[in-house]
Image (cartoon, rainbow, N blue to C red):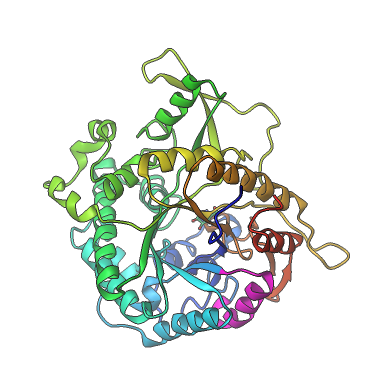
Amino acid sequence: MSFRKDFIWGAATASYQIEGAAYEDGKGPSVWDRFSHEPGKILEGHTGDVACDHYHRFREDVALMKEMGVKNYRFSISWPRLIPQGVGEVNEKGVQFYSDLIDELIAAGIRPIVTLFHWDYPAALQARGAWENPESPKWFEAYAALCAERFGDRVKDFITFNEPQCFIGLGYGKGEHAPGYRLPLSSTVVMSHHVLMAHGLAVKALRKYAPGCRVGYAPCGDARIPASEDPADIEAARRAYFQVGDNPEGWAFNVSWWSDPPILGSYPEQGLRLLGQYLPQGWEKDLETIHQPLDFYCQNIYNGDVVRAADNAQGYEMVPQPVGHPKTAIQWPITPDALYWGPKFLYERYKLPFMISENGMSSHDVVSLDGKVHDPQRQDYMHRYLRAYKRAAEDGVDAIGYLAWSLMDNYEWAFGYTDRFGMIYVDYQTQERIVKDSFYWYKTVMEQNGENL
Ligand code: NOJ
């Protein structure tokens, strides 16, 4: 047994993290353009002004993808590059850029998978209250319709949102991401509801203006891994995974608040008890709009927390990682079983074809004396995680794809360029690309549909 024959192998990136050309050709500013320039917000003061200069070098990058054997490429569209004020006038040069990129991909035999929103929110709409404004779902709907109209003839797979947990939780809750606010629950919960409404309206717009396209959604959430295969521990992990508000990092970092309404048509009961009081009036009637049929469900999964059954009110407790447990450069624990239990629990609950829309390893890669970049640790990471994912597929999860994060090194948000996630090394001084060893390894995995894992 292995992955299904039509398994979607590929790699992923996002606009602000690679494009650069932040102020060129009529692009409007995003909240990230503003935030990254605020002193003290980003490690070493890095900004995405130039990033990987992909805006000017996309043909070279597509050629590298082709060499790597990537058949599916997930990238995001910068909303303010397309509509500088967020609503209204369209920037035709921005449309042209994505249109050329899509053509280049298709000519190289690579299927584009387009994420509509990967965090670079139009600054002009931030000034109008962003997601807290009741009009905000409609702004997003119009943007989604434009993407469908202009690109839907060639793009057949769209993803509405990437990790709403992060842009709401980190951007408006903890203040660590753009726009850097620390707002109360009465604001962030309202925002979450508007984001979910925007998702529902966007799904409808995509289906209307790009008939026949497939639509997915890509939230995140650290998986929960049972401490043992004892049914009590498995049940404890399942329960912890879908719990709202037990994460010390903030309420937004949970799965069910963001996925139950669009897929099951209701907010999770336990989440409602905690947060329902903050939802905007009349939220119940919005659920119909939020709950749109989806073709696939994605998650970005990088790690998981170990959970065991416990004799307490919640029925579970977290098991701390032992001292010396392996970690990536960004300090995330290496827990390959996250790609077994995560997809398994998610498929069990949501029952939609499932795709890993991001998974990969940050490492402080260097160019060796031989001029190459050797990254056996990334290869080992991916190997272990993919094995776990394959086991989930063999156990009945309808696993339709895996998109590695990331195609190339890029701007890791508040960590700037210090963390490297790519299978292609980027020299940010010269913009030279150097393929890493993992590039060739992943090529063989894709070629062999994971048989060699
Ligand atoms: C999540 C985000 O979607 C992506 O932008 C980020 O670079 C990776 N994970 C790694 O943190």
Q: Farthest residue toward the top? A: 311
Left or right: 181 as drawn, with respect to 33? left
Is 58 colored magenta in this rendering? yes
Residue 129, given in percent of the width and then of the height, sits at 25, 60
Q: Is residue 22 above or below residue 296?
A: below
Residue 214, given in percent of the width and then of the height, sits at 37, 65
- At 53% across and 68% down in the image, what residue appears? 73
- At 23% across and 48% down in the image, what residue appears? 190
Instruction: Report which quarter residue 122 is drawn in.
Output: bottom left
Left or right: 15 as drawn, with respect to 86? right
Q: Which residues are magenta?
A: 54-71
Residue 43, given in percent of the width and then of the height, sits at 58, 55
- At 28% across and 41% down in the image, what residue appears? 185
The residue closer to the viewer here, 348 or 137, is 348
Is 170 colored magenta in this rendering? no
The residue closer to the viewer here, 249 or 423, is 423
Q: Is residue 140 above or below residue 237?
A: below
Left or right: 263 as drawn, with respect to 397? left
Q: Farthest residue toward the front? A: 1
